[in-house]
Image (cartoon, helix red, strand yellow):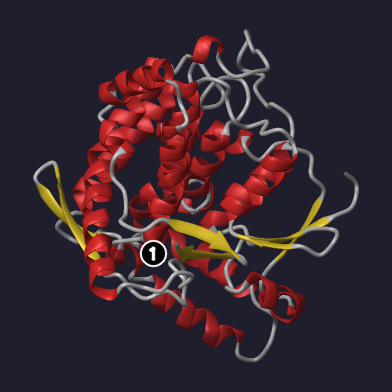
Amino acid sequence: MTELHRLYAITHSLYSGRARSYLIKHGIPFRELSSGHESFKAEVLPKGKLPTIPTLVTPDGEVIRDGAAIIEHFEAANGRPCQPPGPRQQIVSALFDVIGSDGLLRPAMHYRWNFPQCNHEFVRYHFLHSQRDVPQREDKTEAMMDRMLHAAMFFGVTDQTRDLVERLYLEYLDALDAHFEQNPYLLGWRPCIGDFGLLAPMYAHLGRDPYPARLMQQRATRVYRWVERMNRADQDAPEYFNAGTDFLADDEVPETLLAVLRLLAEDFVPETRAAADAINRWLAGNQPEVGAPAVGRSAHAIGTAEFTVRGETITALAQPYRFYLLQRVQSVYAGLDSAGRAAVDEMLEACGMSAITGIVLDRRISRSGNLEIWA
């Protein structure tokens, strides 16, 4: 493949990092442009439907919006190189894709927007230069950043929950660092789909913004190296002297990774359950038409979900996109034979994630014409 793809993205965008890393790791030639280019509005948006990034334009002009869809496009065409063969590893890979893309938004938004003394100028540069140099650029930048200042609160970070959010993140960071002591990627010697999903918050927000990046460098060096590694075309694992080339053998999911999942389960599971309840109530009351947008600006606002973690009550947006991705985990699980399902059940029980196979919305979310829609 020699013709260039166009990736409309930007360095500080959480979801862009997921798609960019996939293209880099698989040697797919691309040119990155920001959505501020005139070609995005004139040529791409009519097909992409929503002004979100990442959006990919293939050499033959096909437009693919959303990082999950971009990765699926290449996975389906190339024999799914990032899907491990075993049931336990397949479930873990798909689960980390959900956790990275949606389950870690709370610390990602907190560490970007609640430390302005360290982050403001760095973040402002990127918002400013994602737009064309026109007279309104400064005012537009200020307006965009003013809106985003409240992002952490929308995801449940308040004065009352701030200490809990930081404590959970630091414990997760420590556990992930211990895992990467023995493994350069989540499941061995090459990245799985879950690595790309997890990179979304861990690169643009938590691995680049000055305050959380310094925290990661000083507290979890191995995690920081993984963030670097995920943006390199080669394996980039010289510090591992027994390096292999494949996923771990015999469908192994290391205890160190189960320890990471146990920590993440503490807020991911209750939030997922509460969000499903809130969305199902909304579905019952509103009965959206088949084909109505479920995600994005055209979708109706659902509201918030309230849940408890370590005795603290958190209120956060109930987001259907989490369930669009969670459906993939549940589809993998549904397709397993009895032996595979039993192995997965035992693993999920051991890490506190057993509930995720049964938390579902009353309506499925499908995808058509670059939109996630109610089925």
Q: In the figure, 24 relative to 372: above or below?
A: above
The answer to whether 74 appears left or right of 106 in the picture is: right
- What secondary structure is marked by label 1? helix
- Residue at screen point 31% across, 72% down: 287
Q: Where is residue 267 in the image (x, y as percent from the top left)?
A: 25, 43
**Foreground of the two, 263 or 205:** 263
Picture quadrant of residue 83: top right
Q: In which quarter of the image is residue 63?
A: bottom right
- Can residue 109 be seen? yes
- For the view shown, which residue lies furthest in the bottom direction? 135
Give the x, y percent position of residue 352. Answer: 25, 29
Q: Please report the residue visible at 62 percent of the width from the left and 57 percent of the height from the top.
A: 11
Q: Quadrant of residue 320?
A: bottom left
Q: In the visual, does 169 lie left or right of 374?
A: left
Mark 1 surroundings within 10 Å by alpha-carbon count, few (fewer than 14), some (14 through 19), many (20 or more): some
Write down the residue under mark 1: 116
Name the quarter where the C terminus is drawn. bottom left
Q: Residue at x 30, y 18 (%)?
A: 346
Does the rendering let one see residue 221? no
Q: With 114 as the anchor, is 337 left or right in this view?
A: right
Q: Which of 348 and 211 lies nearest the eye of the viewer?
A: 348
Q: What residue type is labelled 1?
A: Pro
Q: How many labels does the image show?
A: 1
The quadrant the N terminus occupies is top right
Where's residue 209, x and y in %? 49, 54
Closer-to-camera residue (133/190): 190
In the rendered image, the residue lying farthest to the right is 2
**Percent x, y of residue 257:** 40, 23
Give the answer, above or below, for where 19 lies relative to 176: below
